[in-house]
Image (cartoon, rainbow, N blue to C red):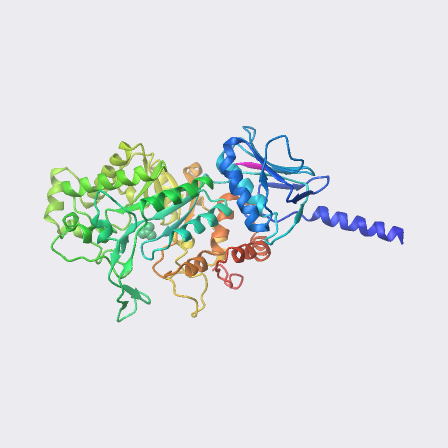
Amino acid sequence: MRKFLLGLLFVSMIQAKAQTPMITPAPVSMQIQNGQAFELNQQTQIVADPFFAAQASYLQAAIQEQTGLSLKIGKKSSPASQIQLVKTAAVAQPEAYQVQIAQNNIVLSAADIRGIVNSIQSLLQLLPLQKTATVSIPALKITDYPRFAYRGMHLDVVRHFFPVDYIKKYIDYLTFHKFNTFHWHLTDDQGWRIEMHSYPKLNSIGSWRDSTLIGHFKDTPARYERVRYGGYYTKKEIKEVIAYANIRGITIIPEIDIPGHSRATITAYPEFSTDPNNKWGVAATWGMYNRQNNVLSPNPKTFAFLRAVFHELADLFPSPYIHLGGDECSKLWWKQSAEAQAFIKANNLKDEFGLQTYFIQQVSKYLAEKGRKVIGWHEIMEGKLDTSTIVMNWGNDAKAVEAAEKGYAIIMTPGKPYYFDHYQSKDPKDSLAIHGYNPLEAVYLYEPVPAGVRKKSLSAKIMGGQANVWTEYMGYTTKVDYMVFPRMTAVSETLWSQPEKKNYNDFVNRVKTNIIPRYQYWNSSWFPDFEKWRKE
Ligand code: ACM
């Protein structure tokens, strides 16, 4: 009997040892250590290097919310049971961290804010998602760092506008998944969503449309909900969001999209249009490229406007990079415009493509006056730009090769499979999306360094990737959640984890056992049928 019991004990010890916790995105290394587990309870205190004071408070609040345990933030020598946040140069790589769990303490160490935030995300995944008096965490060592320097998620708040609370929640999603950048798409044909003091009609007129398309934009006849729709974030709200993101190690890259996608602008200020006598109206429908989305006209008033608004943007956002759009600017309007043609001639520009480059160069100059650099959609490389410009490639692999050969750093955001406005199933009853088919498996298996770039030994030009969330067919926050989860989780693993750590079946298993409970904890929606719909 005794032997039997000992045997049982042995088996359970082996099982305990073998049970390595699940963390997503998969860390570089995670090893169960010899020794007793750590007991987290109400007596445990958080002790932090002053550099990580804000993150200590963040951790305190996160543990309280998740487990109900209300931990004190203590002084270094006092408490017996500690979670330490240690700043160390030994963890050298940007955003890297270590977690060491032993009987008496948990040590989170990193050299920078993002690193410590990442360590906190891993620790939170080791705690239950329920109220508890005590948690036993096995002795464990995690060593972890990201594969790519840029790991982003985008959100279009123009086609549909979401409250500040949801923007913060979205930033929490990014933090949990160890992304480091939120790309905030703030202006487009359908509205201007940021308070501007230099040109107030951008808000009083440009932030509002008188109706919104119902159904798909290809439906005929088109139907509209005739209700005034819109709004914008005040500077106060934006500062609040930036501060919130800062604590979480998230950089916000704001985008004002020029010289196309400008109907909100030219509705407010027709004098910036190539056709100022037309009554444009803030767009009420989608999919406007080359048809109705008139563009900015190159005149002195337009350039004064661009300088002022990009300066206001740079004064608000601390990001070293600002996004100026540059995508889908139809050349049709400049071809038809006497003013644009005269400008092309007077400035010795080759053609309308040269004019597009002129716009990008001017705004780059305005941003340089504020010490900022430029990101733009891949169309910006139609002309020659400073190679410190970052190309956000939403096109195919050939575009990435072209950008790399021209010397630009590149962020990969390919429509297939990183556009989350595309369908994730082929179920005709699935909730309306723009088109396409980007199921979870395709998203997970996507490799951000294209073979053509690798072949030319230019892989270092790929800074990372980003999934884009265009919200034409996402009128409310639960729909955004449904479209991004679990695909956002898949992107996070591709951008963070080493390729040899990736395994789709294992990932799906983690989504089911660990990640869906997290979506539920957030009270968020997700697409439930992800296992059924496979990569083509
Ligand atoms: C884009 O999808 N027009 C960047």
Picture quarter containing residue 191?
bottom left
Task: Write the residue at 24% across / 62% down.
Answer: 210
Task: Write the residue at 85% across / 52% down.
Answer: 5
Q: Is residue 280 left or right of residue 35?
A: left
Residue 197 placed where, x, y %?
A: 24, 43
Q: Nearer the viewer, residue 274 or 171?
A: 171
Farthest residue toward the top? 89
Residue 386 placed where, x, y %?
A: 30, 34
Residue 252 lies, with reference to residue 479, above or below; the image says above
Task: Write the residue at 51% across / 43% down.
Answer: 496
Q: Is residue 437 left or right of residue 101?
A: left
Residue 41 lies, with reference to residue 294, above or below; the image says above
**Residue 316 seen by the camera:** yes
Q: Nearer the viewer, residue 227 or 95?
A: 227
Residue 374 placed where, x, y %?
A: 32, 38
Q: Nearer the viewer, residue 290 or 215?
A: 215
Farthest residue toward the right? 1
Q: Nearer the viewer, residue 198 or 26?
A: 198
Residue 97 located within the stretch drawn in magenta: yes
In the picture, the quarter occupied by the N terminus is: bottom right
Q: Is residue 518 left or right of residue 302?
A: right
**Main SS class of the magenta portion in the image:** loop
Residue 344 placed where, x, y %?
A: 14, 42
Number of marks: 0
**Residue 445 seen by the camera:** no
- The segment highlighted magenta reads 94-98
Residue 361 located within the stretch drawn in magenta: no
